[in-house]
Image (cartoon, grey):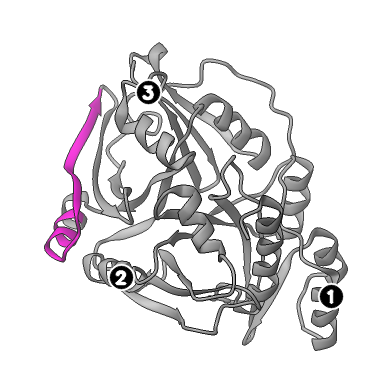
């Protein structure tokens, strides 16, 4: 089934950070991405610095502001800390996607416009999501240059020796919102972008002894785009969603799930490159063995690397979550491998995962 807005795929994700150069090199070294483009004072852009990184179908932009006069970048960084400002969806027609979204309740940020240079043009438009994040509709089919006008090859070519992580593409992007906001944003995305609610986790579906949350997954009707949305639910102690909202000073993108065709090789490489992951107890794997789950991978390998496994029907998914990558306990990555058509999000792993998060919350004094 084709989606109404003509969305082809996730395109890129742009982070606003305190030091673009440092974060870009961390992304390159740790995640195994290639710094392919640069925009900044040396390319004629005085008010910001951006690095374009990619690997396979994965594209990130890391942006910072050299001086506080650029309040459009500086203010979100000082308020939220490092985080995702916007994610882009590659569409057949920016004008059509924006027009449809606007007619169906989307809050506009930037109307359709062209970024041009001698190599062609890129079309973009943006709408609001959550507090001050953005969804960008983009089409780069008429551009023959590097990513977008203003970007040039990186000034310095450094020998970033790291292991190949095999990361492939964005699987889904997760937002955290305040109590009683989840339905609002699910309805907003469903109406403005002709999405549908695919999964609805209600009270008691996602909980531990101490904390709980509610979650809905909205998606394009062809399943190309998946956007889970979480909100806090009453518990004995602070949930991970409440901690995020408190530390981020608002709502926003909690994590990005990146797909891989071979999660064991990817996690071996990511750990060797210095990535820290949440730890689950060995009893989790004892339970998997007791259930005699049928998977292609060796459970000993999953246990050694602390990879989670959730079986759903004939399929299953393997997943693991990094610890927060910045100074504030807000944004993190998920690495995921879907096998035999698995479409879920690891409901069978929620308890073990959230107990691991609670352990780290306690160490931070936020639980």
Taking the spot 40% from the left edge, 49% from the top edge, the residue there is 11
Picture quadrant of residue 96? bottom left
Q: Is residue 247 magenta?
A: no
Q: Nearer the viewer, residue 183 or 349?
A: 183
Q: Judge from the rendering whether residue 270 lies leftward or rightward of residue 315; answer left or right.
A: right
* Residue at left offset 88%, top offset 68%: 300
Residue at the limit of the structure toward the left, as seen here:
103
Left or right of 153: which side holds 236?
A: right
Residue visible at 31% across and 66% down in the picture: 185
Inter-mark Cα distance, 3 to 1: 49 Å
Q: Quadrant of the N terminus?
A: bottom left
Looking at the picture, does residue 140 appear above or below residue 219? above
Q: Give the mark, 1 or 2, whose residue is nearer the N terminus.
A: 2
- Give coordinates of residue 143: x percent, y percent: 30, 34
- State which quadrant residue 310 falls in: bottom right
Q: Neighbour class for label 1 at 10 Å: few (<14), some, many (≥20)?
A: few
Q: Which residues are magenta?
A: 98-117
Disc 1 to disc 2, C-alpha distance: 44 Å
Tell me: residue 287, above or below residue 146.
below
Q: Which SS class for mark 2?
A: loop
SS at circle 3? loop
| Residue 213 place in picture, x, y as percent | 51, 73
The residue lying toward the viewer, choosing from 367 and 125, is 367
134 displayed left or right of 231: left
Q: Secondary structure at mark 1?
A: helix
Please give the residue where the numbered disc 1 appears in the rendered image. Answer: 283
Q: Residue 21, how many percent across, how many down?
A: 54, 24
Where is the C terminus found, in terms of image quarters?
bottom right
Residue designated by label 2: 2
């Amino acid at each position: 089934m084709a989606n109404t807005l003509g969305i082809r795929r996730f395109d890129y994700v742009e982070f606003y950070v305190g030091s673009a150069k440092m974060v870009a090199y961390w992304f390159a070294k740790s995640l195994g991405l290639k710094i392919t483009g640069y925009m900044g004072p040396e390319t004629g852009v005085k008010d910001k610095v951006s690095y374009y990184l990619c690997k396979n179908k994965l594209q990130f932009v890391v942006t910072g502001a050299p001086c506080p006069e650029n309040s459009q970048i500086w203010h979100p960084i000082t308020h939220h800390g490092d985080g995702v400002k916007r994610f882009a969806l590659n569409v057949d027609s920016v004008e059509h996607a924006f027009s449809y979204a606007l007619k169906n309740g989307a809050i506009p940020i930037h109307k359709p416009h062209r970024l041009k240079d001698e190599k062609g043009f890129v079309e973009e438009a943006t709408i609001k999501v959550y507090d001050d994040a953005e969804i960008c509709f983009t089409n780069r089919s008429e551009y023959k240059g590097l990513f977008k006008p203003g970007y040039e090859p990186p000034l310095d070519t450094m020998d970033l020796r790291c292991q190949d992580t095999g990361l492939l593409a964005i699987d889904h992007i997760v937002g955290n919102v305040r109590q009683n906001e989840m339905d609002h944003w699910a309805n907003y995305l469903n109406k403005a972008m002709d999405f549908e609610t695919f999964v609805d986790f209600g009270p008691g579906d996602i909980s531990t002894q101490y904390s709980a949350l509610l979650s809905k997954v909205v998606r394009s009707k062809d399943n190309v785009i998946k956007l889970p949305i979480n909100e806090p639910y009453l518990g004995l102690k602070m949930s991970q969603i409440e901690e995020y909202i408190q530390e981020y000073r608002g709502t926003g993108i909690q994590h990005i799930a990146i797909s891989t065709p071979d999660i064991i090789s990817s996690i071996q490489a990511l750990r060797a490159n210095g990535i820290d992951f949440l730890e689950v107890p060995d009893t989790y794997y004892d339970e998997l063995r007791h259930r005699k789950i049928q998977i292609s991978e060796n459970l000993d390998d999953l246990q050694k690397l602390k990879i989670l496994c959730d079986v759903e029907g004939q399929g299953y998914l393997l997943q693991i979550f990094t610890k927060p990558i910045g100074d504030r306990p807000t944004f993190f990555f998920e690495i995921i491998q879907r096998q035999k058509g698995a479409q879920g999000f690891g409901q069978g792993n929620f308890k073990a995962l959230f107990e691991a998060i609670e352990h780290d919350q306690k160490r931070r004094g936020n639980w």
